[in-house]
Amino acid sequence: MKKWMLIVVALSIVLMFSACGKKAAKVEPVQEPVVEKVDEPVAQVEKPVLSEEELFQQKSLEELNKDQILKRINFDFDMYAIREDMKPIVQANANWLLKFPSVEVLIEGHCDEKGTIEYNIALGEKRAEAAKNYLVSLGLNAAKVKIISYGKSKPLVQGVDEASYFQNRRAEFIITKK
Amino acid sequence: MTMRRTLLFLAVLLLGWQLRGQEEITIRIKEGMPTIPVALPDFQTGGAAAQRNEVAGILHETLWKDLEFSRIFKMVPREHYSYISRLDPNAIRFKDWASIQANILISGQLELTADDRLVFSFKVYEVASERFIFGRNFGGKKDLARLIAHRAADEMLKHFGERPLFTSKIVYVSESGNDRDIYIMDYDGQRPTRITFSSAMDLLPSWSADNEKILYTSYRNLSPELFMFNIYSGKTELLSSGGSNYAADWSPVGDRIVYTSSKHGNADIFLKDMKTGQEKRLTFNPAIDTSPCWSPNGREIAFTSQRGGTPQIYIMDAEGSNVRRITLEGSYHDSPAWSPDGMRLAFVSRIENRFDIYVYNLKSNEISKLTENAGRNENPSWSPDGRHLVFSSNRSGRYQLYLVDYDGRNVRQLTSSGENKMPKWQKSLK
C-alpha cells in the first residue's frame, strides 16, 4: 500500500518538474480566458408507447369507443351470418376483451334502408346475436355481452349507393363498462 | 288458383317495368259505385264580420274536401252555382239545383257567439223530390271548426249507410333532428298533436280496438320495450320485459294484443291477454317472425316470417296453428295490413330495391299495386271504412305520409315538415 503511494507521489513529482521545464522555455504565452463548461446530461429517454393496459386505464369509456378499440363488422345484404373476412375483426375484438375481463360490451345491430322497419329490427338483432355468439365461442363470458337492435333507424352514412349500404349493415361493439 | 295468381303477379310486374318512368300506374279494382252529386253552397253567416267569414271558410272547405274524398259523393263544381240564383234557405228553388246536376243540396248556417263559440247548423235536401232528408246542429269552441266540419261529413256518411271516417285520427312517428316522437293528427293531416316527449326513439305506434290507447315501442329504457299510452288519462304503462318488443296490434275482439318479442332469444310472435296479463307464444321458429296483424274478426293473424329463407306473408289461426303462406312470388314482403272488411291484405314488397304497396284480395287471389315509381313506400294502414290507405314514402326526398284510395287513385300528401313515418289509421269508429 505504502509502496504504491510512494510510486505515485514520485511519478507526480517527476511529471511536475518536466512540465515546469517546458513552460520555462516558452515566451510570453497568450493568456486565453478560461471558460468553464457547464453542462447537464440530457436524459436520453424517449416517451414510451403506452401499453394496452396503460391506455385502457388512462382512457375514458367515451375515448375508448371513439378510438374504436373494438372494430365494427359489416354484413351481406339481408344476411346475418358473420362474413369470413369479418371473422378476424371479431377475433381481434375477442382477444382484447379477454385481456380485460372487467369490460362489458353492448353489440348494436344495424341495417341498411333497403329493408322494412319491422323486419329490420329483427334482422339487426340477429346480426348482433351472431356477433355475440361468435365472441362467446371464442371464450368470452356471455354475461358481459348485451345486444340491441336499432334496425335501420341509425345509419352510419347517408348515401344511397351500395358502398354506403354496406357500411350501414353493421354490428358495433360499444364498451359500456371498464 | 296458384297459376292464376302467378300470372297476375307477373302481369303487374311487367306492367310496372313497361311503364317505368311514367307518372302513375293504377290498376283498378272494379268495385266502384256511382257517386252522388252534392251541391254545397257557401254558408249563411247573417252578417259580414271578418272572423265569421274566416270560420265559415274553414268549415266549408273542410266539409267540401271530406265529401270529395269519400268516394261516395261527388261535388258539383262551385262555378256552376253562379249560373243559378243564390240559395235562399227559406225558399229553395230546387229546379235550379237540379239544372246544375245536383242530387243532394246542403244548406249550412254559422253563428258565432260572444264567448268564442260557434254553432253550425246544416240541412240536407234531396233535390229531385224537393224533400228535407236530415239536419244537425253542432256547437263548440271556435277553434274546433275543422272537427265540427268532420262531424258533419261523418253524419252524411252515416245517413247514406256508410261507416264514419272523417273524425278518425292517424298516429305516426315524427322526426326532427335526432328526436323521434309519436304524434296524432286528423285523417287529413291537420291538427297534429305530440303525445310522447322522450329523448329516446319512439317507434311503431298502433291503436287499441277502442281507439283510446296507443301501443308503441320506445328505446327510453335502452332496449326496445312496449308501452301503452292512454290518450284520455295521459298515463303510460310498460307492457314488456326483456329482449326487443315491437309491432304490437290490438285484437278487434277481446282485450288481446299480438306483438313481436325476442325475449326467448329470437324474434317470435306473442299473444297477451290485456285483462289477465297472461301470455302465449304463437311462433316457435329459429327464423324471424314479425309484423303480426289481426283479421277484423279476431280469428286469424297475418304476419311476416323468414322461415322459408326470405321474408314472406303468412296467415295463422289466432291460436298459432294452421299456418299458411300467402305471398308466393318475390323475395321480400312485410307490413301486412288487413282491410276492415276482412277481404284484402295490403303489404309492402321489395322488388329491385324499391318498396311498393300491394293489395292482395284473399277471395279472388288478385294482386293490385297501389304505388309505382315513386321512392320507397312503406307501412300501409287502412282507413276505418276500407276505402283508403295511409302510408309513408320518400318520393319527395324525406319520408312523408300520403293517402291513397284502395284502387291507387287520389294520392294525397299529408305531411311536409321534418320526417314522418309509420302511420296507423284509427280502427272503426263507433
Image: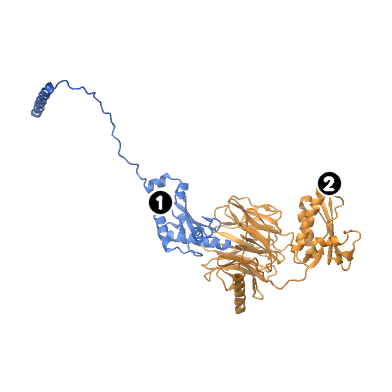
Chain colours: A blue, B orange
Q: Amino acid at mark 2?
A: Ala
Instruction: Looking at this view, name the residue that lies furthest to the right.
Output: B91
Where does residue A103 sit, x and y in percent of width and height?
A: 44, 51
Element carrying mark 1: loop
Q: Residues within 10 Å of mark 2 (few under 14, many from 20)?
A: few
| Mark in the foreground, 1 or 2 | 2
Q: Position of residue B325 (x, y in %)?
A: 58, 73
Q: Nearer the viewer, residue B62 or B346?
A: B62
- Which of the labelled discs sits on residue A109, or is there none? none
Image coordinates for residue A35, horizontal then vertical, percent: 25, 26
Q: Is residue B160 visible?
A: no
Q: Chain of mark 2?
A: B
| B421 left or right of A123 in image | right
Choose top left, top right, bottom left or bottom right for residue B214. bottom right
Q: Are marks 1 and 2 on the same chain?
A: no
- Reply above or below: B179 against B388: above
Q: For the N terminus of chain A, which image quadrant? A: top left
List x then y, in percent, for residue B282: 58, 67
- Callout 1: residue from which chain? A
Element at label 2 = loop
Q: Which mark is residue A100?
A: 1
Judging depth in this view, the residue of B409 and B18 nearest the camera is: B18
Q: Disc 2 marks which residue?
A: B114
Left or right: where A24 falls relative to B229: left
